[in-house]
Amino acid sequence: LASVGYEKTCVLFNVGALASQIASEQNLDNDEGLKTAAKFYQLASGAFAHIKDTVLSALNQQPSLDISPETVGTLSQIMLSQAQEVFVLKATADKMKDAIVAKLANQAADYYGDAFKQCQYKENLPK
């Protein structure tokens, strides 16, 4: 084992990846699918955020690109964006007021914008 911190990071990364896969496979045409998708996108976001905010500091080595703070931070933000998008779909399906749907959609757009900005870290890419 390289380190317990590294192994914990890898396990949490896989938890986030699996949660996002489960969320993406939900049927968004019904209430249960929307609720499940939102829950698992939030779980994925939390797993990636926990890696960035807590676990990486325990590593005794430089993280690889896939688990770098920039990468897991971006993944966390994308998952949060997708969860918010599901809330927009749910609000639309529930025929909520247009003003509420607009606020939820605006927040989703902001989250996606933040995720896009985080994707701009080019110094990690090979030349």
Image: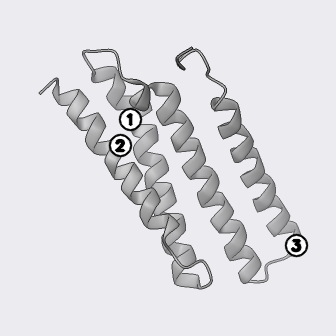
The disc placed on residue 98 is 3
The residue sitting at 47% across, 26% down in the picture is 69
**Residue contact at pointers 1 and 2, CB within 8 angstroms:** yes
Question: In the figure, is residue 109 to the left or right of 23?
Answer: right
Mark positioned earlier in the residue sequence (2 or 3): 2
Residue 35 in percent (x, y) is at 53, 74
Please tell me which residue is depicted at 72% across the width and 82% down the height of the picture. Answer: 93
Q: What residue did someone put label 1 on?
A: 51
Q: Answer whether residue 53 is visible to the viewer in this image.
A: no
Hey, what amino acid is under mark 2? Phe
Residue 68 occupies which quadrant of the picture? top left
Q: Are marks 2 and 3 in contact (CB under 8 Å)?
A: no
Within 10 Å of the Cα at label 1, are there few (<14), some (14-19), or many (20+) other Cα atoms? Answer: many
Residue indicated by mark 2 = 13
How far is mark 2 from mark 3, CA to CA?
37 Å
Going by the numbered disc 1, the residue's amino acid type is Ile
- Location of the N terminus by quadrant is top left
- In the image, residue 84 lies at what x, y percent? 65, 59
